[in-house]
Image: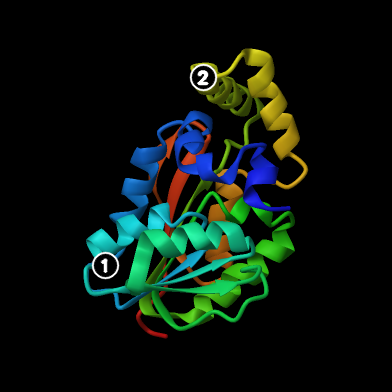
Amino acid sequence: MGVGAHLGIRLAEYDRRIRTFIPHYEEMLDSAAALVSSRAALILDLGTGTGALAARCLLVARRARVAGIDSDAEILAIARRRLGARAEFIHGPFETAKLPRADAVVASLALHHVFTQPGKKSLYRRVYRALRPGGILVVADCCPAAEKSLQIAQRRAWIDHMCRTYSRSQARAYLRAWRSEDCYMPLETELRMLASCGFHPEVAWRRGMFAVVAARKSRAW
């Protein structure tokens, strides 16, 4: 399913509508991009979408190029127009695409499409191998609390954000619809999986259900 169909919107509306869906969206992307080294030469963007995170990364690493991977050809066309000559694109699923050697790997609201822990650990191992020594994986995504009452409160806050634009029933309907393709693993689960794959993960930013995780690869490899 393409991004527009998954979200229930027209793809041309994505950059405007995503802000109505995701609280603190701008702050989250800015926090993620700030973790990329200004000396990075190649930034790999998994599930690049319209290129919103990649564009911010290129403002930080002004000599870098971006390699963007996405399975939605339509949304890649938008990213191509946005990022121009500093980007190249791979059309296909990031779970199986060949990952080029990179100084940083970034992903925004993309990795929650990997449904199982074995599948995500397999992806993290592939990313680890693709990163140069000292490189970083930056993941901005929905990472709820493991404790149930906190998770309920976080979900309520998410719905409250969406209710600034939509009715409460519409907001809940969106979340129900997204369940068919989205799997939000608890933050502590993500950190544990990353560490098991050799990374040194830290929480760089968190607001409610959403977090930015920075996972560094040791310089010894």
The residue at the point 52 percent across, 47 percent down is 141
The residue at the point 36 percent across, 52 percent down is 32
Residue 215 seen in the figure:
no
Disc number placed over residue 37 in the picture, else none = 1
In the picture, measured across the screen, residue 204 lies left or right of residue 3, that is: left
Residue 197 in picture, x, y percent from top left: 57, 70
Which picture quadrant has residue 142?
top right
Residue nearer the viewer, 117 or 162? 162
The residue at the point 71 percent across, 58 percent down is 117
Q: CA distance from mark 2 to mark 1?
A: 36 Å
Mark 2 closeness class: few <14, some 14–19, many ≥20 residues within 10 Å = some
Which residue type carries mark 1? Ser
Residue nearer the viewer, 63 or 220? 63
Q: How many marks?
A: 2
Residue 18 seen in the figure:
yes
Query: Quick one: SS at disc 2?
Result: loop
Disc number placed over residue 172 in the picture, else none = none
| Mark 2 or 1, nearer chain start | 1
Q: Which residue is mark 2?
A: 165
In the rendered image of this protein, does residue 163 appear above or below residue 25?
above
Residue 194 in picture, x, y percent from top left: 54, 62
Q: Which-is-in-front pick, marks 2 and 1?
A: 2
Residue 209 in picture, x, y percent from top left: 53, 34
Which residue type carries mark 2? Thr
